[in-house]
Image (tube, rainbow, N blue to C red):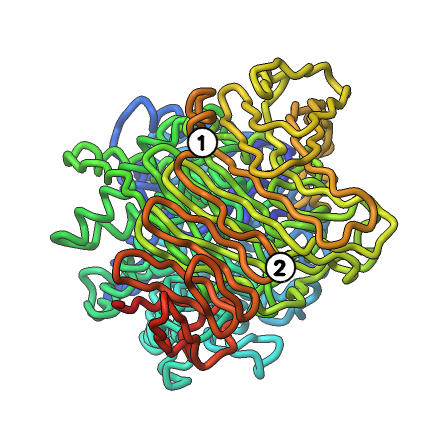
Amino acid sequence: MPVNRRNALRGGALAAASTVFLTRPAFAAPAAPAARAASGVPTATAPIVAAYRQLQTGINRPSPERAEALANLGRVAKAYNASLSVAGGGAPLWTDLPLGPGSDYTTSMYARLRAIAVDWGTPGGALSGDPVVLDRIKSALELIYASQYNENVGEIGNWYTYEIGIPYYLLHTLSVVADQLTADQLARYLAPVKRFVGNPNRRANNASVVETGANRADKALISIVSGAMLGDAAWIKTGIDALTDVAGGGAASVVAKLDRAAGDGFHVDGSFIQHDTIPYPGHYGIVLLTALAGAIHVTQGTEYLLPQALKDKIYALVGDSFAPFVYAGALMEPVRGRMLSRQGETGHDIGHQLTVATLVLARTASGKTKTDLNALAAKWIKEGTYAPFLKIPDPERFAPGPDLVATPGIEFAQAMLASGARPARVVATHRVFGQQDRMVHVTDDWSASLGVSSTRISRYESINGQNLKGYHVGDGVLYTFLPNAKGHYTDAYWPTVDPLLLPGTTENDGPVDPKFGGVPVGPNAHTGGVRWDDKHGAFAMDFTSWDGSLVAKKSWFFTPSGIVCLGAGITSTSASNVRTTIENRNLGEGGRGALTADFRRVPTDLGQASALRRPHWVHLEDVGGYVLLEDASVTALREDRTGAWRDIDTGANTKGTTTPNTRRYQKLVLEHGVKPVNASYAYAVLPGASVVGTLTSSWAWRVLSNTAVVQAVRVADTTLANFFAAGSVDGVRVSGPASVAIGWRQLAVSDPTQTQDSVTVTVHGKSVTVPVKGTFGATQVVRL
């Protein structure tokens, strides 16, 4: 069975699951086998190879958790070893992985061999130090090299397999057994790596492609480690130089902060983009960070030590680009691109990978930097109770690290915790990432984020057979994260949720785009918002449906107690019903929870819709409250929905299982009818609120305007407003599209369109012209 392009194989004959990154902490040397070959690794570069081996096998720090993880690894490694045939003669190594050209099965062969080798090289492993197993590993290396992956094969299928995927697994394996191989053997097995990754700056199958982001960082680390195994100082240096793109004058440096909208890499506002238009701190950014952590780790204490200035930039990425999007140890959905659909890479899976990368970085840091990194890792471990970092109940899921079972990740975490590191505190935060059209709102108890799009950022990513029902993930999805539902989006949410009714979206109930797929950007430039302080902000989106038949002006106003959601100008030319989804909550398998509207219990019989006529408020037990701020008809429906991960991911190397999952959902939907003209909505979402809190929440704000020109609320002594065109509200006038916040003698302004030179704001007769050209949606603060 094929392996995910960034995933290791799951146990037994199961499909791929745990994401492969290179942040796997490491072990000490294994027990000496009966006979040892003279190591082919040159003495001068042996420390790099030893450090990379440590990233596979750990530091041999005993604990019950390590023992449990190692037992899981041993079970899988023994099964792979038992089913491995090294008879040769054209026979496959594993009967379910046929030999032959192409990329579908070779990665899986190396992944399985890697599991065997790591277990062999880990003290206490089920196969540890077994000379018979070592001979089988050597034979398998030769057989796969001769038949599948050598310097003479052509790239068939996914380029990534030949240039990154296989090289990583091969290096994992070789680093463990390198001292059992001769220099000639190492040179032989690394010859294809030299061919495909000899120049990490360029794509081997198309030299006109300059590598960027995570791909460049991966290739850089592969070059450093491969060069060390061969004693090739020039290749090592080429890998190190690739990190900052010395060959290209720094244009593709992986740590450069881009000062523009979209584009691959990190940006000055903390955004991270891959594939030009996809916000990706929740996957490719972590892949990149993991590679950077590995590069620092393996070169530490050697003549190839990375410059301190470069390391400092890498350390700073954790808090700036990643930490804001972590809740309860998991990465938030809006920054995970198509990985939403991967069964083996939920937000918690990738959150564990981020934690390990952070732990690896902290081991080479010092002073306050070390303290801060450890504090973040400790916080994520403490809060991640849905998928405990230190306990792996199943080797196929929630392994805290890059591969099948994260023994090294557990060891690094326990060493950090034993040092007395204190978890970072939760700090109220409202932050807008204009260069990736994302925002995050953090309170002491809950957090929220939005899935939106624009002419700069894609509405969705659906490629390689993945994210097959992500039709509306960029149409204004409001994600809320609650302390008593930490597994909400991990618990089979994406294969079971109704993809046409995602919370926060306004959609036709008609057919989806028949050409759905790819990475299409949105049709309108107006997406963005303004930050007032750590607890308040506004965000807006000028929405047009995929076929242009439905338009709406949408705003979200974030406060400490909840989010005020306004919609106006809702107009459709389609014959389909138009609906705005207030809530579509995953209650789990057989989930319960009373639903109350205006003190009356709403029936929750499965499949039986209830029409709520002009409710003032609705409360869902253990979830929160919803306040209707204008008259509306609301449909409430509790239903069980069944789906399989294969329904949303059929990728050759990533596909999920066909096992059905059934989850219970509570829907709350606003009905706008057929062909509405200038319809509107106004409601507030109060995450975690009690019934009393829901009733009293309306005291916290007042809606000032809800039109297609301006949507605004008053919160205490502050006005938050989104202008879609020149207009005025509450004594404030603007010259054009803008998000503004106005309080005591201070004005905050942003240009959500990212197209204007300046915005003029007039407050009670006093005009201020605020330059916004080149700010890419960033908030500009002016004293009045």
Q: For the residue carrying disc 1, how many other residues have a C-alpha within 10 Å: few (<14), some (14-19), or many (20+)?
A: some
Asked whether 30 or 471 is in front, the reply is 471
- Would residue 723 appear left or right of 780 to someone viewing this image? right
Q: Is residue 270 above or below residue 535?
A: below
Residue 729, percent across and down?
A: 48, 59
| Most distant residue in the left direction | 367
Asked whether 276 or 397 is in front, the reply is 276
Asked whether 477 or 176 is in front, the reply is 477
Residue 769 visible in rendering: yes
Q: Residue at x 59, y 23 (%)?
A: 588
The amino acid type, in three-letter code, at marker 1 is: Leu
Residue carrying label 2:
708
Image mark count: 2
- Quarter of the figure with residue 428: top left
Residue carrying label 1:
482
Q: Is residue 441 above or below residue 315?
A: above
SS under mark 1: loop
- Would residue 17 appear left or right of 759 to someone viewing this image? right
The amino acid type, in three-letter code, at marker 2 is: Ala
